[in-house]
Image: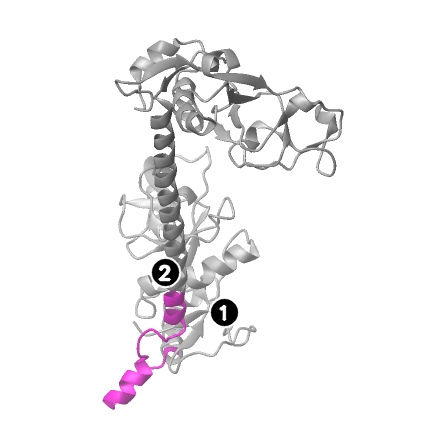
């Protein structure tokens, strides 16, 4: 759809605060300040990535670079020079100064070039986005929004005296440079925090963050139960509690036997995830299910080390089935992932939206009482499972060896 509202009504509304003007400034129609050059309908059949001048398409305006070349015949008037102001006439109506090489202007991209020194290109690059955003807000769309150069030409642009305009542009650029520097600093800090957090997690799972139980026991002159002994005892207790007549209880092989034998701190042992706790895949959604509508978590709710409860859905459960899938505080939800960035994400359930179940795109890990603390299990999942599963691009997490410690 195209823009049909009144420009002057939009300016008077000034919804984003960027369409105002100082009392001693005047407004001038942009068509009286600048010339407009619309892009050419270049034949897509001549687009390539190897030869010919580069082509500026709408998607290239903001990033200042293009990978598309044109191998057909061209005219000098079709070129845009570095430093020209460009406006995208479809979509979100972006505007930016072109920072790429001399390139061809494709259709639905418009160049705006000041006539004289009344305004500068840089000044227009700061002013125009606010007006374009206001137009975008008032343009109805069923598919793609369209803008014409005639509409842009009618924009009433505030124009300060040229010396004041130059001072404004210089001040804006100074402040933007400071902001860019601050953003770069924050990105470095964020990267450093990520590395520091990873380093802390690595130290924790390698037994270097705090003194081990073996070291403390030795210093206090007392005995302690190594994790391997504790694991053997707990597995025997689980075997003894196994229902008679049920499927035969077969403990998984010792991880040391299945080809994973890292150097562990004294007193630690290795355990697969299903030795250290109970693993259950959530229930799938299906139209044939009946029963009371109950809350359940899905992949979208499991963020990086937290549960998002803003959009918890409902589906029907019978009482007996809901009991099977009901979460208890301390359960860990691990995402199978619907995209690479979601794969392996995990979070500890702490009673949010209780009672609640979980969907088949999530696995629940419930740590064996007395063997593994849920908070430490979550550290292990983040440090081991999440990274290893993502890298392997698996559809579902497999039991991984987990260092056992006495909680």
Residue occupied by mark 1: 252
Q: Residue at x 34, y 40 (%)?
A: 175
Q: Is residue 245 magenta?
A: no
What span is colored magenta in the figure? 199-227
According to the picture, the residue beneath numbered tag 2 turns out to be: 378
| Sequence-first disc among 2 and 1 | 1
For label 1, the SS is: loop
Q: Looking at this view, name the residue that lies furthest to the left.
A: 220
Figure check: 3 above or below 236: above
Q: Give the side of residue 88 with respect to residue 76, left or right.
A: left
The percent coordinates of residue 347 (x first, y second) are: 36, 53
- Residue drawn at x 41%, y 72% is 403
Q: Mark 1: few, some, or many residues within 10 Å (few <14, many ≥20)?
A: few
Front residue of 174 and 133:
174
Q: Nearer the viewer, residue 203 or 306?
A: 203
Compared across the picture, whether 56 is left or right of 179 comes to: right
Whether label 2 touches label 1, CB < 8 Å = no
x, y percent for residue 137: 39, 19
Image position, residue 139 (x, y; %): 43, 15
**The quarter of the displayed image where residue 209 is located:** bottom left
Q: Where is 44 relative to 200, above or below?
A: above
Q: Residues within 10 Å of mark 2 (few under 14, many from 20)?
A: many
Whether residue 386 is visible here, answered yes or no, is yes
Q: Is residue 146 visible?
A: no
């Amino acid at each position: 759809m195209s823009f049909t509202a009144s420009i002057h009504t939009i300016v008077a509304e000034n919804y984003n605060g960027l369409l105002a003007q100082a009392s001693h400034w005047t407004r001038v129609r942009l068509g009286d300040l600048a010339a407009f050059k619309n892009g050419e309908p270049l034949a897509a059949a001549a687009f390539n990535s190897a030869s010919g001048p580069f082509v500026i398409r709408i998607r290239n305006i903001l990033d200042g670079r293009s990978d598309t070349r044109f191998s057909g015949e061209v005219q000098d008037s079709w070129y845009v020079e570095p430093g020209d102001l460009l406006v995208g006439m479809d979509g979100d109506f972006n505007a930016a100064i072109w920072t790429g090489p001399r390139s061809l202007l494709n259709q639905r991209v418009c160049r705006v070039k000041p006539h004289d020194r009344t305004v500068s290109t840089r000044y227009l690059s700061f002013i125009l986005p606010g007006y374009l955003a206001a137009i975008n807000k008032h343009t109805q769309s069923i598919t793609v929004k369209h803008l014409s150069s005639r509409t842009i030409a009618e924009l009433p642009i505030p124009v300060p005296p040229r010396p004041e305009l130059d001072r404004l542009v210089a001040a804006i650029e100074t402040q933007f440079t400071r902001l860019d520097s601050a953003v770069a600093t924050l990105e470095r800090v964020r990267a450093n925090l990520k590395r520091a957090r990873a380093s802390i997690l690595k130290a924790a799972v390698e037994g270097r963050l705090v003194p081990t139980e073996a070291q403390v026991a030795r210093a206090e002159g007392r005995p302690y139960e190594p994790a391997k002994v504790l694991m053997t005892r707990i597995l025997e207790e689980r075997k003894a509690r196994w229902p008679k007549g049920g499927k035969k209880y077969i403990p998984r092989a010792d991880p040391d036997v299945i080809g994973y034998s890292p150097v562990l701190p004294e007193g630690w042992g290795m355990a697969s995830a299903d030795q250290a706790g109970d693993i259950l895949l959530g229930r799938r959604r299906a139209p044939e299910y009946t029963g009371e509508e109950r809350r359940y978590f899905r992949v979208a709710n499991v963020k990086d080390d937290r549960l998002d409860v803003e959009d918890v859905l409902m589906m029907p459960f019978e009482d007996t089935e809901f009991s099977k899938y009901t979460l208890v505080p301390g359960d860990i939800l691990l995402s199978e992932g619907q995209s690479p960035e979601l794969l392996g994400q995990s979070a500890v359930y702490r009673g949010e939206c209780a009672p609640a179940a979980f969907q088949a795109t999530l696995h629940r890990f419930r740590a064996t009482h007395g063997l593994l603390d849920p908070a430490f299990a979550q550290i292990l999942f983040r440090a081991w499972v999440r990274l290893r599963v993502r890298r392997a691009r698996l559809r579902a997490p497999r039991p991984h060896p987990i260092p056992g410690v006495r909680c």
